[in-house]
Amino acid sequence: MAALLAILCIVLIAIIVVQIGKVTELAAKIRGEEEMQEISNRRHANYSLLFMIVFLVGTIWSALYYKNDMLWYGPHSSASEHGASLDYIFNVTLFFTGIVFVITQILLFYYAWKYKGEKGRKALFMPHDNRLEIVWTAIPAVVMTFLVVGGLDAWNEVMADVNPDDDYLEIEATGYQFAWHLRYPGADDKLGAREFNMISSANPLGQNWEDEKNLDDFHPSEIVLPVGKQVRVRITSRDVLHNFYLPHFRVKMDAVPGIPTYFVFTPKTTTTEYRQQLGALNDKGEPKYPEWHLPADPTDPTGPKRYETFEYELACAELCGSSHFAMRRLVKIVSEQEYQAWLAEQQSYYASSIRWTAEDPWTDVLHPYERVQRTQEFKDNLEKALSSENVTDKILKLNYVNFETGSDKLTALSKYQLDDLVTAMTDYPNLTIELGGHTDSTGDPESNQALSDSRAKAVYNYLTSKGINAGRLTAVGYGQTRPIDSNDTEEGREANRRTEFKILTQ
């Protein structure tokens, strides 16, 4: 109904305009063309003055009204250290260009009013005036010089790269349709090498897994940064042009396919502190910024307010495709303690998605962090067994001791846990153990018994070769007689194929 009324109003206005035109045309014929032209000139000249007043008042009013939302004044001060320089240059530029804008608009409409067409008036042709040329060339040149020099000074400060000796965190953001793939360095604080021709479904960034710096890099779903820490962001693109845009930090840099870029900044305001800015109260206890005290969810007036749910964000400032909106990522600025706690929860992409797969070039070695984990696991299990009075608890499985299929030859990775056992035997000189070999039920019992005997003996020989007294060791093969799981499934058979040691004395 409202749409129909609006259409009818537009139609009526159009009819009125046409009728006014016909009346004006008829009046012109009655009064004479020249007289009507003069009346029309005066009318339009006055209209131009009225339009100028409405236009300038509307422009200034809208700028003041929307200054917090559109121009980012009020609570939206820069959340990074370098942002103040950019905001200053923006304010200076806005000041001078605002003056020029107002003056030129006033002169434009004033001249249109003053020099309207009148009977008997002739236009004066001025081909050249040196004084005027100097004035309107020199003044803008001086202003532009200060603006450009100030802008270059801010640019050189903001775009400076880190020094090798600086304490900084380097992360990486790769744009693609339609998301950002983020990468952080692990404990070594170094990002590993990448090769575009190594990109695959399992390796979305093309990381070169032979580069050990890649092994602890992790891929979070959001950006988390410690406040006060200098951050260098590597910015790349995997397909089309994107733009790495952190508006609250005054960070904006194109992500160009084939041309890596970067941006360096230092966040100075945590997410919690920025929320407090948005929700600040004045001296009377009233909200300084009422718009941020509205419900975050309009359908739930009792729910959290807008400032309470505020989050920094990473956006793409290029129209990169139909799902451009999906490029948004959350950004959290936290204290150093919170950042370290978050880091401790992260797992490297290599460990979670590449280790022991066809893309892993390190299947014949254990990485230092894996050795540490396995050694600690072995020590914990041994301490538990030594402190227990239960005979069953005295039997410990050597989880990482394996043999080649159908053979008693130890695999290369078995030595790491066997070395842990050697260390334990050295640390506990009274410890004596029985080494037990077990198989699944595949094949005939006699062969399985012989295989378990030889495998237990292989472990025995390894320990004695490392200096462990043979009198402290006993090797026994149990074949398929002591299963711990069903032999009807592959998982069960794998569990039954095991090597154990039993603590006899301690």
Image: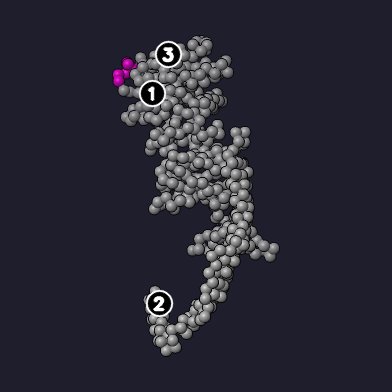
Q: Which residues are magenta?
A: 443-449
Q: Would residue 144 appear left or right of 441 to someone viewing this image?
A: right
Q: Residue at x 50, y 17 (%)?
A: 433
In the rendered image, the quadrant that contains the N terminus is bottom left
Local crowd size for mark 2, using a 10 Å CA cut-off: few (<14), some (14–19), many (≥20): few
Q: Residue at x 33, y 30 (%)?
A: 489
Depth check, mark 1 against mark 2: the one in front is 2
Outermost residue on the left side: it is 444
Disc 1 element: loop
First of labels 2, 3 by sequence position: 2
Amino acid tagged 2: Ile
Amino acid tagged 3: Lys
Depth check, mark 2 against mark 3: the one in front is 2
User: 110 above or below 383?
Assistant: below
Image quarter of residue 400: top left
Local crowd size for mark 3, using a 10 Å CA cut-off: few (<14), some (14–19), many (≥20): many
Amino acid tagged 1: Arg
First of labels 1, 3 by sequence position: 3
Magenta residue check for 448:
yes
- Residue 497 marker: 1
Image quarter of residue 54: bottom right
Residue, disc 2: 10
Q: Would residue 201 appear left or right of 116 to someone viewing this image?
A: left
User: 438 above or below 156?
Assistant: above
Between 385 and 390, the one lying in front of the other is: 385
Disc 2 element: helix
Residue 312 in percent (x, y) is at 54, 51
User: 472 above or below 333?
Assistant: above
- Residue 457 marker: 3
Between 260 and 219, the one lying in front of the other is: 260
Magenta residue check for 211:
no
